[in-house]
Amino acid sequence: MAAHKDGPDKQQVKLDELNLSIIKHLREGRKSFKVIAQDLGVTENTVRARVGRLVSDGVLEVTGLIDPEVIPGLKVAIIGINIADRSLIQTSEQLSQLPGVISTSIVTGRFDLILVVLTQGDAGLLQFMTTHLARIEGIKSSETFIVCKGYNVKVPYVL
């Protein structure tokens, strides 16, 4: 099986207790490797090497996230999509490349795919739907949910 464009098959990556502990510490994105190492009883170089490996394996991405409610006009939309055929992977990969798309997931339930999209206001959502989403062949139907109030929602600024 070929590796996905986001990296190797993540199920094959070994996540031992130390890796998981380091990842938990990195929830505080500005915590230094030195502080993490002291707390876990390992060397700073061990933490640095482990983080480097987790990043290169595609398990971990260190990035800045925003609270979309703090920036005026930003809207998060969740879009459920049903596709006409069963080209789930191909359609998901196409959708993941559209402007503003934070994530695309193949799911179970009443939808085939779920997109999380960041847009600039109502006009941005309309533009996304009519200019970008409408051009993807094979979409049978979609249903859009606007996030009115989110809790613990942090997203990458992709606009």
Image (tube, rainbow, N blue to C red):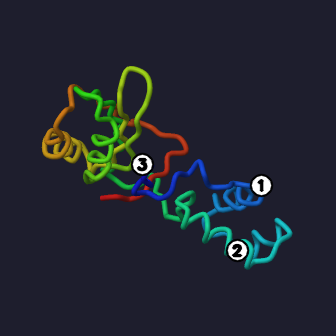
Residue 157: x and y, percent? Answer: 38, 59
Residue 132: x and y, percent? Answer: 18, 46
Residue 37's disc is: none
- Residue occupying the point 77% across, 60% down: 18
In this view of the protein, which residue sits in the foreground, 42 or 122? 42
Return the residue at label 1: 17
Q: Callout 2: few (<14), some (14-19), or many (20+) C-alpha neighbours within 10 Å?
A: some
Q: Residue furthest top?
A: 110
Q: Nearer the viewer, mark 3 or mark 2?
A: 2
In this view of the protein, which residue sits in the foreground, 62 or 151? 62
In this view of the protein, which residue sits in the foreground, 56 or 95? 56
Mark-to-mark CA distance, 2 and 1: 17 Å
How many marks on residues?
Answer: 3
Mark-to-mark CA distance, 1 and 3: 35 Å
Above or below 104: residue 72: below
Q: Nearer the viewer, mark 1 or mark 3?
A: 1
Q: Residue furthest right?
A: 41
Mark-to-mark CA distance, 3 and 2: 30 Å
Mark 3, secondary structure of its residue: loop
Residue 33's disc is: 2
Disc 3 marks a residue whose amino acid type is Glu
Q: Nearer the viewer, mark 2 or mark 1?
A: 1
Disc 2 marks a residue whose amino acid type is Phe
Q: Callout 1: few (<14), some (14-19), or many (20+) C-alpha neighbours within 10 Å?
A: few
Return the residue at label 3: 69
Q: Earlier in the sequence, mark 1 or mark 3?
A: 1
Above or below 47: residue 99: above
